[in-house]
Image (cartoon, rainbow, N blue to C red):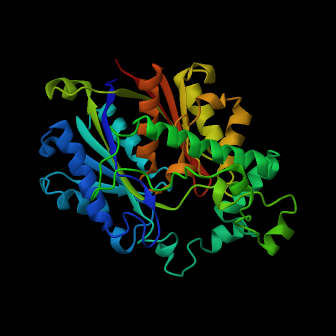
Amino acid sequence: MRRAFIVDVVRTPFARGREGGALSGVHPVDLLARTLHGLVARNGIDPGAVDDAIAGCVIQVGEQAANIGRQAWLAAGFPETVPAVTIDRKCGSAQQAMDFAAQGVMAGAYDLAIACGVEMMSRVPMRSNRLGKDNLGPMLHQRYPDGLVHQGISAELIAARWGLTREALDAYALRSHRRAAAAEDHGLFERDILPIDGIARDEGIRRNTTAEKLAALEPAFVDEATAVRFPEIEWVVTAGNSSQVSDGASAMLIASEEAAQRLDLSPRAAITHFAVSGDDPVLMLTGIIPATEKLLARSGRTLGEIDRFEVNEAFASVVLAWAETLGADLDRVNVNGGAIAFGHPVGASGGRLTANLIGSLEESGGRLGLQTMCESGGMANATLIERLG
């Protein structure tokens, strides 16, 4: 089987996803187009040599509607002969774009592909694509007559089931901000970040947060009806120990070994194994546990062989439950911070995780990295990469 290489990863700064956020004045198509242009320019490739561009985007409505991957490709000034497709696997969309691109290379369908993602949550809010309609339908309601729940409630249910206290969640959140700030100070993200209109730093990192400030925040998802349905919930999830609503885009260049040699590219990592999994859609965010287990089984690796992990910090409870269940060493998890600090533009975050994962492997000299992302609807994807060089 042919090998699939990650040549390069680039992303925009991640900005607060609300009016007045640092990127909120940029159209989503333009933000992704500029990211694509930056990736192509700094690797010196002919964009016409790309076989396909696969874009992740979750809220495909309004300014993000009608295959934003294609719009962005054309907006970047690239050849009309190269197609693009936009996919939605919720928070794992950009990671799934990477996996699909790599699988295409391995299968011989592609020699060179771009995987990317974008989400402008300041301009296209979550749930706006529902247009006020019931997006579940009578048959799904019949299967789950008590109803599905908001992700924040799922995070609360995970905290309750795993016995995770408010103090533990806040301590993990503080760790995320401190590690992200330290990594930024050491210039670890300079290679990854494409400045946009003079903005070159992530807007969400809170350098002045403290345990006391986090402890002062009110629970974010308190609801009387939910408390009756789930009396075990202790209301420990706050805005401070959850990922931030954000704007951002990411893109990566995926190549076959032959294409990399022919184009004189220097790959940074190989993508070796993949897994996707479904899980209870009420708990929703626990799919990363079976996805990780499936990936390890498929690759013949053990958890102890993995040098670095990137586990998306949708909520602190998600990462802590994953680590406790699998027995993972937290000192190897999200070593340079996560979405609690950087923010989480849902269609683009997979690229940021990949960039952080490769960067941390290069920094530490580690060889194997595992990336996994929980997703709405009770799904998850997981990818194993191997650092080259």
Q: Which residue is drawn at the image coordinates 42% and 31% (left, top)? A: 359
Q: Quadrant of the C terminus?
A: top left
Residue 143 lies, in percent from the top left, at: 70, 65
Q: Which residue is drawn at the image coordinates 68% and 39% (left, top)? A: 322
Q: Quadrant of residue 136?
A: bottom right
Q: Quadrant of residue 84?
A: bottom left
Q: Quadrant of residue 10?
A: top left
User: In the image, is 346 to the left or to the right of 293?
Assistant: left
Total of numbered circles in the picture? Answer: 0
Residue 156 lies, in percent from the top left, at: 75, 57
User: Which residue extends farthest front?
Assistant: 208
- Taking the image as drawn, is residue 95 in sight? no
Q: Is residue 132 or residue 35 the one in the foreground?
A: 35
User: In the image, is 337 to the left or to the right of 163?
Assistant: left
Residue 205 lies, in percent from the top left, at: 51, 51
Vertical order, 98 against 343 (above or below): above
User: Which residue extends farthest bottom?
Assistant: 132
Vertical order, 47 against 363 (above or below): below
Q: Which residue is drawn at the image coordinates 12% and 53% (left, top)? A: 79
